Amino acid sequence: MNTKRIEKVIENMHACGLKQIIVSNTASVYYLTGVWCEPFERMLALHVKDSGEMTLYANKMFALQGLTDVPMVEYEDTDDCVGVLAPDMLPGTLGIDKTWPSHFTIRLMEKRPDVRPVVGSRPLDEARLIKDGEELELMRISSRMNVEVCTRIGEALYEGCTEKEIQSLYNRIALELGSAGPSFTPLICFGPNGAEPHHDSDGTRLKQGDTVIMDVGLLWKHYCSDMTRTVHFGEVTDEQKRVHEIVTAANRAGIAACRPGMLMKDIDRAARRVIEDAGYGPYFTHRTGHGIGLDEHEFPDCSSVSEVVARPGMIFSIEPGIYLPGKFGVRVEDLVAITEDGCEVLTW
């Protein structure tokens, strides 16, 4: 149990006017208790009161006894798990994790009509937003390993290889280096496939002149990394070169804007303006970035509508791109950690 983190969450609960919350996200439960548990279809619920009292509700099959000093209530598969949880809820407002399956919420409402559920992820989102020194170092290690794997797969490209083969190679090297594997399914995109920002790698074969997008990340002690590199296989056309230079400039402009006090929407604006000024605005089709840590995508967005203010300890991606349908795409992504006077790039 991490006392400092719990204190942060309680402080955030007070700010949100919440007297109790249910935390169900695996990463958030780990963040507070030190226990990593993937419940799948079964119920995992950490009940947190603004007094600091916590109770973890878990299936006996999870075998969590002795792994945390948080008081625990266990249930069996034949039990009504929500029925075990329901009597302990306080009447009134209950903040519920945004990831808790709706069928648990509905059953709780049926059993406790005096409880009013609201989305209650903000206290954890705000706490996890600011990484401590230990978390930052784990993110550095994860990112350094990711750079190494990405470099190796870039060097391994050969004419005729498939996207799936390079995807598998990334997974294999990530494991060989000691990581727990990828933090998300690697996106390997050849040629026109790169014009789809989230193309599902397939059997497309690499040929001369293709632009290659490699969007990859891995896990180190539960912490995620994420980066995208774009390379050109064989001769590069003037258009490919120009687009790559524009996206790289947008990435650098976004990074240059990363410092304490900046609104996330203004960081997005700094990167997006470069692409718009070059005449490719309609082809930058997604936000500039996202938070990252124990989850691959965390609060907040780095987007045109995000009012979140950058603060020391925040880690997020800067990943502008240009996607030309039927031709190719270019994306350049780095992770930045906000420092006291600027930012540290974790993926250089």
Image (spheres, rainbow, N blue to C red):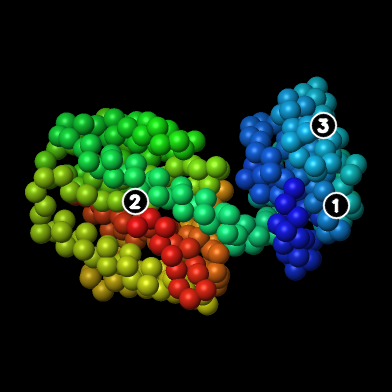
Q: Is residue 136 left or right of residue 92?
A: left
Label at residue 198: none
Label 3 CA crowd tier, 10 Å (few <14, some 14–19, many 20+): some
- Between 29 and 206, the residue placed more toward the observer is 29
Amino acid type at mark 2: Thr
View extreme (top): residue: 78
Return the residue at label 2: 228
Q: CA distance from mark 2 to mark 1?
A: 42 Å
Label at residue 74: 3
Q: Quadrant of the C terminus?
A: bottom left
The secondary structure type at the circle numbered 2 is strand
Q: Is residue 269 left or right of residue 3?
A: left
The secondary structure type at the circle numbered 1 is loop
Q: Quadrant of residue 124?
A: bottom right
Q: Is residue 326 left or right of residue 54?
A: left
Q: CA distance from mark 1 to mark 3?
A: 17 Å
Q: Which residue is pictured at 77% across the width and 23% down the height?
A: 77
Lower sequence index among marks 2 and 3: 3
Amino acid type at mark 3: Glu
Q: CA distance from mark 2 to mark 3?
A: 43 Å
The secondary structure type at the circle numbered 3 is strand
When the figure is inspected, residue 3 is found, relative to residue 81, above or below; the finding is: below
Label 1 CA crowd tier, 10 Å (few <14, some 14–19, many 20+): few
Q: Do the numbered discs 2 and 3 sit on residues whose CB atoms are within 8 Å?
A: no
Q: Do the numbered discs 2 and 1 sit on residues whose CB atoms are within 8 Å?
A: no
Return the residue at label 1: 53
Indicate the position of residue 165 as horizontal and vertical percent values: 29, 30
- Between 283 and 52, the residue placed more toward the observer is 52
